[in-house]
Image (cartoon, rainbow, N blue to C red):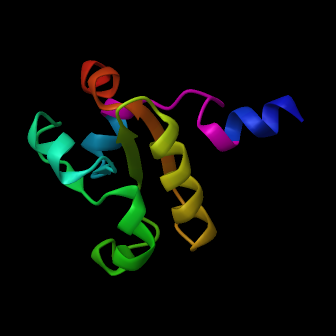
Amino acid sequence: MLNTIKNLLGFGPKANYADLVKQGAIILDVRTPGEYASGHIKGSINISVDSLARNLSKLKDKNKPIITCCASGMRSASAKNILSSNGYTQVYNGGSWGSLRSKL
């Protein structure tokens, strides 16, 4: 049960984010546009978690790796669940954008 919860929140087995990006992964920043404007990972896409379900068409390839990030990791976990429940097959919760940036 605990492992299931950890996996849902993105705290399961660790992914090598740098390798995923080299393989063409999308970095999806799910913070608000204002938060994104104050700093973000170069090359990332900004779709706030509140509008993600309405903007799935912007993420065309459901088999392409997607790394979600936000300010703390909570919204990115929600985004991961939204994407997974809509058929996206390789979704990773990268946690906070600052922490993710240091892993790239």
Q: Position of residue 70 (x, y in %)?
A: 36, 39
Q: Quadrant of the N terminus?
A: top right
**Relative depth, front residue between 36 and 85:** 36
Q: Residue at x 80, y 39 (%)?
A: 4
Q: Is residue 35 above or below residue 6?
A: below
Q: Residue at x 66, y 31 (%)?
A: 12
Q: Position of residue 101 (x, y in %)?
A: 25, 26
Q: Is residue 78 above or below residue 53?
A: above
* Residue 24 as seen in the image, left or right of residue 66: left
**Relative depth, front residue between 55 and 35:** 35
Region rendered in magenta: 8-18
Q: Is 15 a magenta residue?
A: yes
Q: Is 93 a magenta residue?
A: no
Q: Residue at x 84, y 30 (%)?
A: 2
Q: Is residue 104 above or below residue 30?
A: above
Q: Position of residue 36 (x, y in %)?
A: 17, 43
**Relative depth, front residue between 37 and 69:** 37
**Image quadrant in which you'd find residue 16:** top left
Q: Residue furthest right?
A: 1
Q: Residue furthest front?
A: 34
Q: Residue at x 62, y 29 (%)?
A: 11
* Residue 99 as seen in the image, left or right of residue 44: right
Q: Quadrant of the C terminus?
A: top left
